[in-house]
Image (cartoon, rainbow, N blue to C red):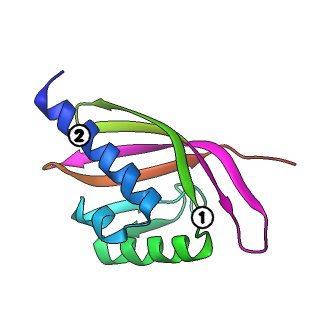
Amino acid sequence: MSDDRQAKLALLDTLMAAFNAKDVDTIVSHFTEDGEFLLAAGADPDGKLFKGRDTIAAALRERFAAVPDIQWLDGESWVFGDKGLSEWHVSGTLPGGGRLDCRGCDLWEFRGGQVSRKDTYYKQVNS
């Protein structure tokens, strides 16, 4: 395995741990200044976009406050050049008491040893 690929996989492991610890400062420190963070849902076909570290940090703080027990479990990641893929199972208690419990993935892009784009996809759970 190349050193570059190994470093990117280690970065994704660090980010997974930071997401589970709700460590916003660590998460955004690994994004480029102009980094993009796309949610699975939003008004646009690409979901909701947050651009730049400060905007991403605010979105994460809001998400962690709304779902304080959110956890990403059973994660596995792969890296292909300047792109990466992470699969996981996310769970948590939604505002109002409902459950977030589904599989999903993130598509990552890297630039200069940092994340330039994170694009999230969730399975749709119908009850």
Q: Is residue 14 visible?
A: yes
- Identify residue for label 2: 8
Q: CA distance from mark 1 to mark 2?
A: 27 Å
The percent coordinates of residue 64 (x first, y second) are: 52, 71
Name the side, left or right, on which 63 lies relative to 31.
right
Q: Amino acid at mark 2?
A: Lys
Magenta span main SS: strand
Residue 34, picture quadrant: bottom left
For the point 38% across and 70% down, the residue is: 56
Q: 83 or 75: nearer the eye?
A: 75
Q: Which residue occupies the extreme right position in the image?
A: 127
Q: Residues within 10 Å of mark 2 (few under 14, many from 20)?
A: many
State the residue at coordinates (33%, 44%): 13
The answer to which of marks 1 and 2 sits earlier in the sequence is 2
Q: Quadrant of the N terminus?
A: top left
Per the rendered image, the range of residues in magenta is 89-111
> Residue at the location (44% across, 51% down)?
119
Residue 30 vs residue 2: left or right? Answer: right
